[in-house]
Image: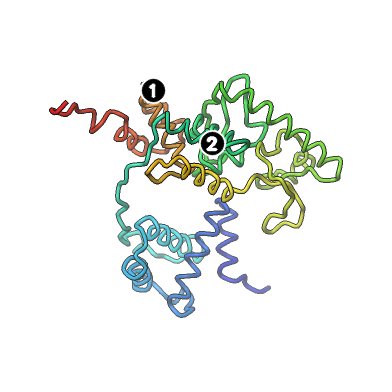
Amino acid sequence: MTTPRLLDQVRDAIRVRHYSRRTEDTYVHWIRRFILFHARRHPREMGEREITAFLTYLAVQKNVAASTQNQALSALLFLYQKVLEMPVDWLDDVVRARRPKRLPVVLSRDEVARWFNALSGISQLIAQLMYGTGMRLMEALRLRVKDLDFERRQVIIRAGKGDKDRYTVLPRRLVEPLRTHLIQVHALHQADLAAGFGSVALPFALVRKYPQADREWGWQYVFPSGKFSTARGDTVLRRHHLDEKNLQRVFRQAAQRCRFGKPVSSHTLRHCFATHLLEGGYDIRTIQELLGHKDVSTTMIYTHVLNRGGRGVVSPLD
């Protein structure tokens, strides 16, 4: 039996741990770059000096951000500790680049409303849902029908960042628009079933445990794609969720039409959610849970961008 290639071993180790597909792609990318940087030498033949040289090259020659350098280090940590299972205690002591603290860009409520008005259709509904719940873009796109609880007005976010589940609020204002939207999605699903399609990708091995679950209404995406496609490593034609890159482009173009004069992205809606809740008097711990932050110190950043001027101080000129 032949030994799998190193990068295939990396992929297998990541999938066993149920890491996200994005993490898999990122780790494989940095491990490949590390090997190519050292003229295709096997990582078993390298050590602290080679890793330090690679990280220094990224920082000095490529001028990458601290977060990018730390991402590369995390990939190499995973390679040596989880895949090669080499005793590399020294690797834990490699100095990580300090990530500078940046204040998030936050729009006022009026600016958020203008942004919504510059959008239409599904993109507007998704933007409103993200602002009203604090969800990340991919969390919104991966939302399943069963995760919407209209009676309790809450949303269950499955396998969010860090593979954690959490609850967040479902805005009352979006209950009827979402119900109307789901009527259309249900009709599309019924048409797919009639045409011999209608299955959806399920997490992990659920499709083997529940063979018919992939065609059930509750498992369908709330925001399905307009076309069928095959996922990587799969040959079955399915209707996946909307493409995040297309939505990011739509959001960006709408923001440009609003001429905010500051850089905004889909993630800005999450920042606005947290900041506007703080302005409304909600406590930081509640907001931490809604956002799914592991540590409250991450949520505390929003206390610095409250709409009260410089730290809430009244200028002597005023």
Q: Residues within 10 Å of mark 1 (few under 14, many from 20)?
A: few
Residue 166 coordinates in the image, percent (x, y): 52, 33
Q: Are marks 2 and 1 in contact (CB under 8 Å)?
A: no
For the point 58% across and 31% down, which residue is it?
156
Residue furthest out toward the bottom: 39
Which residue is nearer to you in this view: 276 or 294? 276
For the point 82% across and 39% down, which residue is it?
191
Q: Amino acid at mark 1?
A: Tyr
For the point 75% across and 57% down, which residue is it?
235
Instruction: Please give left or right for residue 68 compared with residue 217 in the image.
Output: left
Q: Quadrant of residue 286?
A: top left
Q: Secondary structure at mark 1?
A: loop
Disc 2 or disc 1, which is closer to the eye? 2
Residue located beneath label 2 in the image: 127
Q: Amino acid at mark 2?
A: Ala
Q: Residues within 10 Å of mark 2 (few under 14, many from 20)?
A: many
Q: Residue 282 bears which disc, if any? A: 1
Residue 254 coordinates in the image, percent (x, y): 51, 42
